[in-house]
Amino acid sequence: MGQNAENSPSRAANIFINYRREDSAGHAGRLFDRLRARFPGRVFMDIDTIEPGADFVDVIEQAVGKCEVLIVVIGREWLSIKDATGRRRLDNPEDFVRLEVASALERNIRVIPVLVEDASMPRLEDLPPDLAKLARRNAIELSDGRWAFDVDRLLQTIEGVLQEKAPSAPVPGPSDRGQRVPARETVIPGAWIALAALVLLALTGGIGWSLVKRETPQEQVAQMVESVPLTTAGPEEQPPGPTVPEEQPEEIAPGGSPMGQEANGPQAENDSALAEQQPAYGPDTCKRGFVWREARPMDHVCVTPETRRQTVEDNLQAEARRDPAGGAYGLDTCLPGYVWRAAFEDDRVCVTPETRDQVLSDNSKASERRMRPVVRWTKSLLKSRKPEQASQQ
């Protein structure tokens, strides 16, 4: 059993997570966070406290009886963990894990075995009689390497089960059939015309204002720098890299001149033949709306300002989220409910599973969030190319 319960079991809490603390507490907590995000208020994880004098068998049967899906988290030690007397805990008829699974199997509740840490599905001969049906249930494996993908598969399965058990719409009774259905009120066409005119007027005004008041690239850069938070995780961390808006090439008319401009004039004589805009921060310059993540120095993956603030907070909380006693991964072992961030190789900062999923997504989109050089053809170049085109014709 685990440590935390979202709420006391009720009809709404129809997803029950069964696990053993000594075997898979970390993976169960990580799975609980994902399920709670997808099904808020509908996930029940633990029976933390049983009131003195209460029959714990009845309490478990009531909690499990109200669920529609029971998830059995099975790690490598799930079968072999023993109690203080040296007896296998699964052989104890009063073991909580055994009671929960047996109660769900007896009530024909959907039981989904979930294998973690490369665990194998228990064989029939390894299970007590009241858990024999568990060996025939199809299991799903959650691996650390493809955690998000595997959990999504599990979420789809649970959604299908809940939809099957959702109550259907009530059938109208005899008295309802005899009543006439009131006709829908019709809307006066003139009201629709007036509403459409107002919408068109608003759109026209917005477009005109955007054409009149167009910010220069320098003004846009200043706004981006001011909007990015400059809080740092330590004295060595630098503020986020400012971004430069991507300049669009000028439209060229079929005749070879810029749209709406003349190719001749004194200004064209002073223009250079070719102007190339280079990003202000080289190949690591972020597009507008993104800043450097800086999970470590020189981490120039482009993310949103909100993600960068979360990264700063995670760096500050790194030590507090590690198990001080160590564990399977030494001093880098995270507390239950946290996983390694993996923003780069050997990144052992402990974060929530949702944060690590965001990190992997940001890494995969890093290249498309950076600016590329924009080559702009100027008026003087177009003017110089006109005689050449005429001679070739």
Image (tube, rainbow, N blue to C red):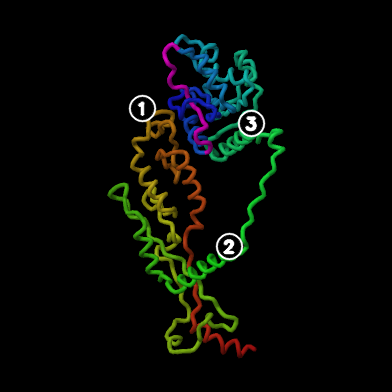
Residue 347 seen in this snapshot: yes
Residue holding disc 2:
191
Q: Are marks 1 and 2 in contact (CB under 8 Å)?
A: no
Q: Amino acid at mark 2?
A: Ala
Q: Earlier in the sequence, mark 1 or mark 2?
A: 2
Q: Residue 382: image x %, image y %?
A: 53, 83
Occupied quadrant, residue 215: bottom left
Looking at the rendered image, the disc whose residue lies closer to the viewer, 1 or 2, is 2
Q: Is residue 316 left or right of residue 179?
A: left
- Secondary element at tag 1: loop
Disc tally is: 3
Residue holding disc 1:
325
Q: Residue 96: image x %, image y %?
A: 51, 17
Residue holding disc 3:
165
Residue at (54, 76) in percent of width and height = 251
Instruction: Specify start and end residues of the magenta stretch as a single range.
Output: 38-53
Q: Amino acid at mark 1?
A: Ala
Occupied quadrant, residue 167: top right
Q: Earlier in the sequence, mark 3 or mark 2?
A: 3
Q: From the viewer's side, name the closer residue of 11 and 153.
A: 11
Q: Which quarter of the figure is the C terminus placed in?
A: bottom right
- Label 3 to label 2: alpha-carbon separation: 44 Å
Residue 22 seen in this snapshot: no
Looking at the rendered image, the disc whose residue lies closer to the viewer, 3 or 2, is 2
User: Magenta span has 46?
Assistant: yes
Q: Residue 372: image x %, image y %?
A: 48, 64
Q: From the viewer's side, name the closer residue of 49 and 296.
A: 49
Residue at (46, 28) in percent of width and height = 7
Q: Residue 199: image x %, image y %?
A: 54, 65
Occupied quadrant, residue 127: top right
